[in-house]
Amino acid sequence: MKKLASSLCLAGVLALPGVVHARPVTLTTQLQSYSGNGAYLAIYVTDAKGQYKKTLWVAGKKTKYYKHLRDWARGSGMKASEFDGVSGASVGSGRTLKVTAELADALIDAGYEIRVDTAVEDQRDNPAELRAPLTTTGKGKPVTGRGYVKSFKYDM
């Protein structure tokens, strides 16, 4: 009986950190009005040195265009495992993309950033169009992009 109780306690301790140390984060990206096709976006996390860590969302289903999301493509290696389950349709002019992703608590207030790369067919590509420090004080505060993104914010 002691052995079973010990095993159950150990299993609970090992499983609990994965549940407790992550939180849902809602990412809201509103695009400028522009003429042309839908925009491809890669929303991802980088560390304090700017090194790619994790894909949060990729908007645009045709993977042949992902190479235009240059900083994200370089960091993720465009491996399907990096965007499986976190991708959807491209985003049209003036539209808003709102998605929820899981983020480890350890990334918050630790020098990490959320970055967004954008591209539109036959138009300009914008690697790291915006950079939003991943902090508790930054949540809910809009960040303006330098291309297609009118505003971006995250809420925890």
Image: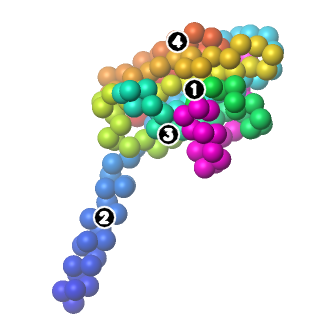
Q: Estimate how packed mark 4 is, as few (under 14), some (14 to 19) or many (20 or more) residues with alpha carbons within 10 Å.
A: some
User: Can the viewer see residue 85?
Assistant: no
Numbered label tally:
4
Magenta includes 74? Answer: yes
- CA distance separating discs 2 and 1: 35 Å
As shown in the figure, which amino acid type bears the numbered disc 4?
Answer: Thr
**Left or right placement of residue 112 versus residue 26 in this view:** left
- CA distance separating discs 3 and 1: 12 Å
3 vs 1, front mark: 1
Name the residue carrying label 4.
Answer: 144
Q: Earlier in the sequence, mark 3 or mark 1?
A: 3
Q: Estimate how packed mark 2 is, as few (under 14), some (14 to 19) or many (20 or more) residues with alpha carbons within 10 Å.
A: few
Q: Which residues are magenta?
A: 73-95
Circle number at residue 54: 3
- CA distance separating discs 3 and 2: 23 Å
As shown in the figure, which amino acid type bears the numbered disc 3?
Answer: Lys
Q: Position of residue 45 (x, y in %)?
A: 47, 33
